[in-house]
Amino acid sequence: MTKNIIIAIAFTFLSISSIAQTTDEIVSKHIEAIGGKDNWAKVKSIRTEATIKAQGAEIKVVSTQVDKKATRSDISLMGMSGYNILTTTEGWNYMPFQGQTKPEPVTADDLKAGQDELDIQDEFLTFKGKGKKLEDLGKDDFDGTECFKLKMTDKNGQETTFFIDPSNYFIIKKTSKIKANGKEMENSSTFSNYKKTDAGIFFPMSIGGGFGAMEITKVEINPTIDESIFKLPKQ
Amino acid sequence: MLKQSIFLFTAIYSTLTYSQSPVNSAMFGTMEARNLGPGTMSGRISAIEGVNSDEGKIIYIGTAGGGVWKSTNAGASYTPIFDKYCQSIGAIAINQKTPNTVYVATGESNMRNSVSIGNGIYKTTDGGDNWKKIGLDSTEHISRLLLNPENTDIIYAAVPGALWSNSKHRGLYKSSNGGETWDKILYTDDQTGCAEILMDSKNPNILYASMWQFRRQPFSFNSGGKGSGLYKSTDAGKTWKELKNGLPEKPFGRIAMTLAPSEPNKMWAIVESNKTGLYISDDGGETWKSQSATLNVTARPFYFSAIVIDPKDSKRVYRPAFNFAYSSDGGYSFTEASYEGGWIHSDMHALWINPNNTNVMYVGTDGGVYVSIDKGITWQFNHSLPVGQFYHVGIDDKEPYNVYGGLQDNGSWMAQSSGPGGVNNAHWSNVGGGDGFWTVPDADGKVLYSEYQGGNMFRVNIATKKSEGIQPEKTSNEEKLRWNWNTPIVTGAKNSKNLYVGAQYIYKSTDQGRNWKRISNDLTTNDKKKQKQEESGGLSADNTSAENHCTIFTIAESSLDENLIWIGTDDGNLQYTLDGGATWTNVSLNVAKCGIANQAWVSSIEPSHYDKNTVYATFENHMYGDHKTYAAKSTDLGKTWTRLNSKEFVSFAHKIIEDPINKNLLFLGTEMGLFATLDGGQNWFKMKNKIPEFALVRDLKIHPKTHDLIVATHGRGIFILDDIRAIRNLTKDIWDKDVYLFPTPDITLNNGKYGWGGPQVSGGWGVGNPDYTPTIDYYLKQRLATGKATIEIYDDKGTLIQTIPAGIRRGINKVSWNLRSTPPKVAAGSVKMDGAGFTAPMVLPGTYTAKLILNDKEYLCKINCIHDAENTDQNEADRKIVYENATKLKGLYEKVNHLIDSVSFYKMALKTDSVAFNKNKSQKLFYAELEKVRAELMGTKKTSIFADEERLREKVSSLYGTFCGMESKPNFTQLEAIDVLQSDYKKQLEIYTSLMIKNRKTTLKP
């Protein structure tokens, strides 16, 4: 009898732990973890300041974004500064570090591929409305953590894969496949050290990517933004 | 009662968890192996499919042991897309209607002795990013997948099935729901499988299937039997009839066949039989006519099973086989491809022709992929597919050390393990032909030993590549020597001057193979029934030494005693001698007692480095249809054996090694993966480390100086996992801690061993070098969920000199310090990048402290930085001179930038009220004078990237960079230049100061 009970209990235990969470559950827990839908709905603009350390040298990055309108990053290093701008209708890159002497326009493909980035909301808050397909790819290792792996595919077939830490439901890695200009490219970013902002939403204060490790030093939610910064500056 | 049970269960549960080690591969994810390739000689290609389009850019390549590779640029580069799954590929099929849906059948069907085994069919719907296994797990070998183009949910799988045993899982399978379920629709018997399936291009209900009876035993091969035959169905596989009219008399062997997509009634079949030949049909297989054909068309039917017709032109017939043959008259006559572009690797198995542009085709050979854009007449090699099939790997103790190895059908090769710019195809050099196996460097550093199949062995002069045959010959009163296909050639682990080779006898040489002494009698079972290789092949004789049997397969001299030698045979004997070969003891019956099949091949033996009585061995029995992982340990010189078991193990075992520093660290290589244990074999985990999870791991070495793990794979070339000390040093007392900062090994102060090495040539295979200095390593039990992770470096005075972002992953984290302090600040307003802002003088020898900060907790370790005594260009005194002058220049650079900032500040201040400024002549003059100073201090004009403007700051920056990178003595002009720049700076400072004195009180006043 005892044996049967043990087996029964063990079975229950195993079944509880092995019940996979549904995609909806993962998504709703993630939204809750990042501060909830209501808090995010109030976010109309974000400005962040960040530092990237490379060989001990510092690169400063200021990012400014107005929801669904435009985004701009200003990068300073070695006493120089450059920027990239993307709006709903145009985009410009000026990277004098790479030898550019004047701003260069982004291609129509890049402009199209970047439109989704203009949406300030977390992808999981908006994907349904945008007709994106969400696919549960089970669990996969990232950085030693068995993560939930979810893939989002938009109407144009652009794919983004998310790795969500099951201990806190934060996204800790995101990989986007970008098909543009006849090429296919893959970009990955990693996220950690999520902090709650005054507006109640959570923000990853450490972001990693091809560029190195970026530490966010300041986050402003809904700052007043002079939208003229999204126009091509006069040279 | 329930409560008690819960308590009991919890107790059991915790006991179970306690005995489990938490160590797994995810902990070592930061340690990524380098894949040395090469792509110079690639490996066997078993399947090629492309997405039909005018551009033809998307190509999938299936390989014999290297998984699936995808190109999205018509072969300019390839990416492996199947690294988490079985690496032996039988067939690929693309759903051309939704081309991101691709099916991969594992288990190659080129049924040679060394072919690997599959574990089912996989499907992706996103072009290969994610895969799902969809069935036919037990089929072992699948030769073709075919989709009905009108209803792509209908898939056929031709399954020859198991090579080494009877199997009911053979036959032709069909799925009508995209692979969710499968039905066997054609089956003969458990010795006969389906080798090929064709579909009429105009009527998908008409199918043709060739059935094939075949079997291998370790000592023979048979192709052919009453089960073989050619069949046709006109109702999508419900009913079948055999096609015979005009075909030769049965029995048949393997039948290669095809039809013309443009005229599907036209068929071609190469029928292995007593009259092997090419047969042609014009009426959908109802009647056949024999057609004379060249040797190449009919050669080795069990191995060359491809014949392809141009999708648009039924007269154009391609036969990729021993060579590449083509016909322009429907197969009546054949000619062979041109060698204008150079040699094309022989032995071909796959051909894809782009149906939208039939001039373009890709052929898969035993040595990689070639592309033709002229209908197969001339070919270009793709150098970027590192899918070579190594059998063994050798290493030497040179700096950098070299790796040596022999490959299936691609000879023997060597390459340096690192070098300027890393290692690429150009670093590999050929040291032997044929099928390569053991390639062993001699301790003298000048010669190596290599071989080709059947024990044909050579002493090769590494410098000149000249070689001498050294194979021992049969002498009087000896039986014919039996040399394994993969004959062991081994140097002594204790006495490296000892060279051993094995036939059925062991031979020893102490003079590099110039003279041999036989040191054993026949150590095999010498079973005559297993020695009839001349009868091997079946309908087509095939005796290439691949079936040689009752031979010695492995030899190992103890690293503790040169008189203790272990040997293993391919027929189950494991023997040792304690007296250098005078007497031998056979322990195979003792091995059998621990549950290892008696006749299993002894695939490797590892005498312990710590105890003469301890020995590890692996055994493999897949040639008798048994895929279990057999690894065992004896601590009493082979009297009793304990199996090493793990749920993690997959497939049959090739190699076990014991770490020379940590006796609890063992590595095991199997046909499907690399495994490790940190507790002497109780708990094992699969090693991933950027090595394919199901890699065919044939051989392993640990380098005694660099602590690298070198992995020879049969399908993905050589991998090096650099410096495994982080694994070796992870003991239980450490993995139980939340955080552990490992002691950092002493760091030699230099800029690494190598210079740049130039750009990586496009289209090849290359890999970088290992970290040039030891990293700061630490262990985290859990990922750091919140908070910052940084490492601060302090000098011996406690001054913070550098801050580095640190990792937060679970397991081992590795952080590199560039051995420098923080670079100087650069003034704003620059018009081009200034490298000085990225560098600082290399620190002096001494003791530094690394402080690991994780959230609010801190951990310290000392780092000893030592002078590079091997650098004869720079002694310690020179190093100090370089450091002092670099520091002086850093100071000067900072002063110059500070002055630039001051000038810019006042310039800006002057313009605060631009209206007033424009009216004020003296302000405008002052402004201009300031700008003149600024323009002397730094380049200010922006014209183009190529227009360099060198002013004081750029001059200081350039000299500073030279001193920061200097690993020799500064020359006189370099030292004097510092004084010149300092006086230039003073001059500008004086101008600035006098300007300020002149203007501060008057002009600057608001």
Image (cartoon, coloured by chain):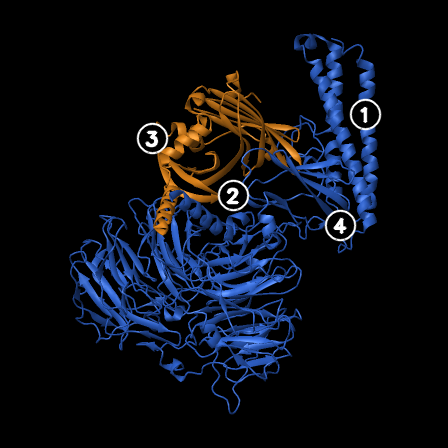
Chain colours: A orange, B blue
Task: Kindly report the distance in space between the C-alpha atoms of the residues bearing marks 3 and 1.
Answer: 65 Å
Give whichever of discs 1 and 4 has the lower sequence position: 4
Q: Residue at x 29, y 66 (%)?
A: B167
Q: Do the residues labelled 4 and 2 touch (CB within 8 Å)?
A: no
Q: Using the image as rendered, state which of residue B62 and residue B623 is in the foreground.
A: B623
Mark 2 near mark 1, Cβ–Cβ under 8 Å? Answer: no
Q: In the rendered structure, are the residues bearing label 4 and label 3 in contact, judged by CB atoms less than 8 Å apart?
A: no
Distance from the alpha carbon under mark 1 to that under mark 4: 39 Å
- Of the two numbered discs 2 and 3 on the same chain, state the one appearing first in sequence: 3
Do the residues indicated by labels 2 and 1 lie within the same chain of the protein?
A: no
Q: Do the residues labelled 2 and 3 touch (CB within 8 Å)?
A: no
Tell me which amino acid carries mark 3.
Gly
Q: Nearer the viewer, mark 1 or mark 4?
A: 4
Q: Could you tell me the amino acid type at mark 2?
A: Asp
Q: Position of residue B446 (x, y in %)?
A: 65, 70
Q: Is residue B980 visible?
A: yes
- Residue B728 horizontal side relative to residue B652, left or right: right
Q: Nearer the viewer, mark 3 or mark 1?
A: 3
Q: Which element type, helix, strand or loop, lies under badge 3? A: loop
Q: Nearer the viewer, mark 4 or mark 3?
A: 4
> Is the same chain shared between marks 4 and 3?
no
Q: Distance between the residues labelled 2 and 1?
A: 53 Å
What number is the disc on residue B866?
4
**Can residue B945 be spotted in the picture?**
no
Which residue is labeled 2 in the image? A143
* Quadrant in the picture for residue B1000: top right
Q: Mark 3 points at which residue?
A: A131
Image quadrant where one finds the N terminus of chain B:
top left
Q: Which mark is residue B989?
A: 1
Q: Position of residue B460 (x, y in %)?
A: 59, 73
